[in-house]
Amino acid sequence: MLWRLAIRNIWRNRRRTLLTLSAMVVSSALLILCLGIFSGMLKDMLASATEQYFGHLEISTKGYQEDRDMFANFSVSDDFLLLLQPQVLGFSPRLRSFGLLSGQDKSSPVELLGVEPERERQVTSLQDHLQAGSYLLADDHEGALIGAGLARRLAVKPGDQLVFVTQAADGSIGNDLLTVRGVFATGDQGHDNGLVLVALPWLQQLLVLPGRLHEIAVRIEHPLQAAAFAAQLRQKLPTTLEVLDWGELLPEMREVVASYDVSRLIIVSILYVATGLGILNTFFMSVMERTREFGVLMAVGMRPGQVRLMVLLETLAMGLLALLIGVVFGVLLSLYMAYVGIDLSGSLTPITYAGGTILPRLHAVLEVTNVLVPAAVLLLVCLLAGFLPANRAARMQPVVAIREE
């Protein structure tokens, strides 16, 4: 009976109920969409920081990531590499060198990263950012994949030749020719202006470091669990090696991820405080209008607790209805932004921050938490906002309430 009374009472004033429902639906739908867009921005930044260069984990000799010493190299057995395969999505052995790259009549300092192309494709996503030409092939030992800013600075294009000069491990001057195979553009100026990918055997020969590596970049399925996976992997590594997750390599990015939950809490609080005030106003007005009705109900035997419960059921019913409609609209908007999105590249440029790149686009990532959080908070706000009016109705004196005009 209380449920039937609650549903009937909701529609006593249809205009006010519809306005309150509209506010609740809009707030929940927009909150789901906003959280989805925030997750999309966070995913883009994390992907640009890890999947374009670092990987989610890096295995190297202790201290190498701090000073990039050419002599801090190591070699691993095939058994060790096979140990990684069942647990990760991909891994890429790398050798690094710094030197001078010349093309035509111009030169520029660069970082050369020697990789195995097929393995590197499993860890980084530079193949998805090609601006011209093609990615390195497995049997191409003299090809180079260079950044778009570096290509403009050297005035070269796919097919042109480059000369690279550096110091080799034996003290000699290493120099050799490279041919531009492709040009990539990630939006990160540091990589676009100074990064060159070459074949690992070619660079090992040039540096006189046969079979040696500086690092192994690793990609896992869940980047946010990289720290836990690194802790497990450390137990299997030789004492001379260390494994660093992306949070240790990019502490600023780790702080950005940590601040995401705080930002989400602030947005949820602002939106639902406003919504709660609207619900509170609606039900206070409803209780005041029905003072005599409450007096009659208590006079014929309804207990104060039942009156309180009836008003709370009204708020719960309105919350459930708003939640159902709001979640449907929020999910639909998030799906649209996930598959279509909004391209802002015509008016905005990529922004590099904390080691990641904020791309000039808006797109959402539909996650379960981005739906459950608004849903749970909306129901909680409804019950909290309805408690004060419900408590007021339950404390009425029947005789005084019946005489109320």
Image: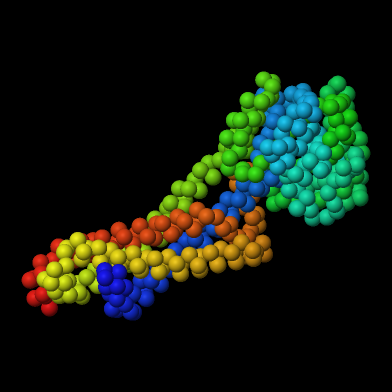
Please give left or right for residue 350 compared with residue 1 in the image: right
Q: Answer with the quarter of the image where residue 193 lies.
A: top right
Q: Which quadrant holds the C terminus?
A: bottom left
Please give left or right for residue 227 compared with residue 48 in the image: left
Please give left or right for residue 370 compared with residue 344 in the image: left
Query: Depth check: 316 or 126 in front?
Result: 316
**Residue in view at x 81 percent, y 46 percent:** 146
Find residue 287 and report its horizontal and vertical position in percent.
Answer: 22, 70
Find residue 167 and report its horizontal and vertical position in percent.
Answer: 84, 27
Find residue 168 and report its horizontal and vertical position in percent.
Answer: 85, 26
Query: Depth check: 306 or 62 in front?
Result: 306
> Where 152 falls versus 108 (above or below)?
below
> Where 381 falls versus 240 (above or below)?
below
**Residue in view at x 54 percent, y 45 percent:** 257
**Residue in view at x 42 percent, y 65 percent:** 323
Q: Which quadrant holds the N terminus?
A: bottom left
> Where 227 falls versus 331 (above or below)?
above
> Would you say residue 252 is visible in this rendering?
no
Query: Depth check: 19 or 142 in front?
Result: 19
